[in-house]
Image: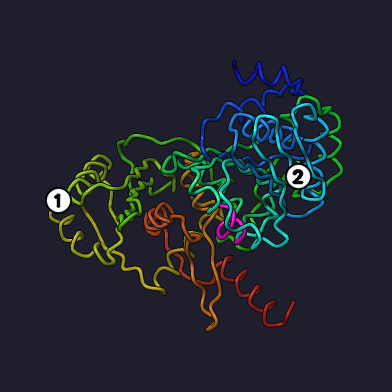
Amino acid sequence: MSTQTQMRQAKIKLYTPHSGQRVMHRSMARFRVATCGRRWGKTYACANEIVKAAWENPGTLTWWVAPTYRQTMTAYRLITRNFRNAIAKDSKTELRIEWKSGGVTEFRSTDNFDALRGEGVSFLVIDEAAMVPREAWEAALRPTLSDTGGRCIIVSTPKGRNWFFGVWSRGQDPAFPEWESFKFPTSANPYIPPEEIEEARATLPSDVYRQEYEAEFLEDSAGVFRGIRDCVSGVLEGPQEGRRYVAGWDIAKHQDFSVIIVMDAERGHVVAFDRFNQVDYALQLNRVQNICMMYRARLLMDATGVGDPLLEQVKRLGIQVEGYHLSATSKQQLIEHLAVKIERGEITFPEIPVLINELQQFQYEVTRAGNIRYSAPEGFHDDCVIALALATWQVGHRGHGSVWMEYLQSELKKREGGE
């Protein structure tokens, strides 16, 4: 007997998903991440997902996790009200449902996420994930899926660029095949009147509307690059006569990626992009040679560590090349130069999701000594950022005194003043 037949015989109240919800339901990814506008219907969609998972897998544990007890109670009430005929036993005190099929669903909050350790969960929903602490996901929730091979849906309206933005970005990266991510604005729900959305657009502050209704991850103070989306333009292009090209190459080290970016030196536009890993250095050199010869591009490459001996090999290939040694100081200069170019709109690049995600994730921190340290968040890559910065360095170098440095200095003054 099919699961659908069993559910109908149990008289479970199924819902009819709208087109956006069907997109998420059809995904076969182990980890699904969705940034959603208000009233898109994420709670109903996830409620049906978790009930289906619990019903189809007798003897397994499923969890609904939210930031607060009140939010978990909302989900508990929704599910018990709509799926009453399929429930064998439920406890409002324990926020626990035992299904007639033999599965169990529990509702937990991350108020005290240490209490979430130790369980083995087969299916997990994290609701309003942007308000869940990063430590709750990394130290408690993600490990619950390891011994079971469990699946997960992570949904939220965005709140800046915290860990939720990080896992959403992972779903945009083909290097993570188990992950898939989606963006669903409020307007994707056909049951919300268009005039209601238009009224919100007209009366709410722009940033509030973009975050709450368009489900956009707005740039915040943790980010380095401002105006990224304004620089997205055009397409990748083949070489053209009379044009001058420059290239940047960040070399793969261990599990990182090699990235080659070619720019039109006059327009500051990215015309070629190549990203790969787990390729030996001989093949990497061959790819670099092919792309640089095709565009007759002057290459600036990372000459740190393994890059130093590779620099000599590149020179022997007949490529016009220089090395850039990445120290703390030189990396700061490189990144700040790129930040100025992006903020002023002096470079452009096509819609390349991996590149854009890395730029959006890239962050800075101020050390105890007062120095600025630039990097990707832990567990993520910055290879595209470095390759773009190396190419951009050749488009026009303006040193310090930038808009970006002025911003950082003002932020440091605020911290010193306790603001």
Report the residue at 73% width, 80% height from top: 418
In this view, 360 is above or below 56: below
Q: Quadrant of residue 223?
A: bottom right
The location of residue 396, given as percent across then percent down, is 42, 59
Q: Quadrant of residue 326?
A: bottom left
Task: Report if residue 17 lies within the magenta region.
Answer: no
Q: Quadrant of the C terminus?
A: bottom right
The location of residue 78, given as percent across then percent down, is 81, 36
Q: Quadrant of the N terminus?
A: top right
Instruction: Name the front one of labels 1 and 2.
Output: 2
Q: How many marks?
A: 2
Query: Label 2 near label 1: C-beta < 8 Å?
Result: no
Comes first in the chain, label 1 or label 2: 2
In whole angstroms, how far apart are the C-alphas of marks 1 and 2?
53 Å
Task: Report if residue 141 lies within the magenta region.
Answer: yes
- SS of the residue under disc 2: helix
Callout 2: few (<14), some (14-19), or many (20+) C-alpha neighbours within 10 Å? many
User: As shown in the figure, which amino acid type bears the numbered disc 1?
Assistant: Leu
Return the residue at label 1.
317
Disc number for residue 212 = 2
Callout 1: few (<14), some (14-19), or many (20+) C-alpha neighbours within 10 Å? some
In the rendered structure, the answer to whether residue 330 lies left or right of residue 363 reads left
In the rendered structure, the answer to whether residue 180 lies left or right of residue 272 reads right
Front residue of this view, candidates 328 and 62: 62
Report the residue at 51% width, 35% height from top: 29
Front residue of this view, candidates 346 and 223: 223
User: Which stretch did the figure color magenta?
Assistant: 135-142
Disc number for residue 286 = none
Front residue of this view, candidates 3 and 292: 3
Front residue of this view, candidates 412 and 362: 362
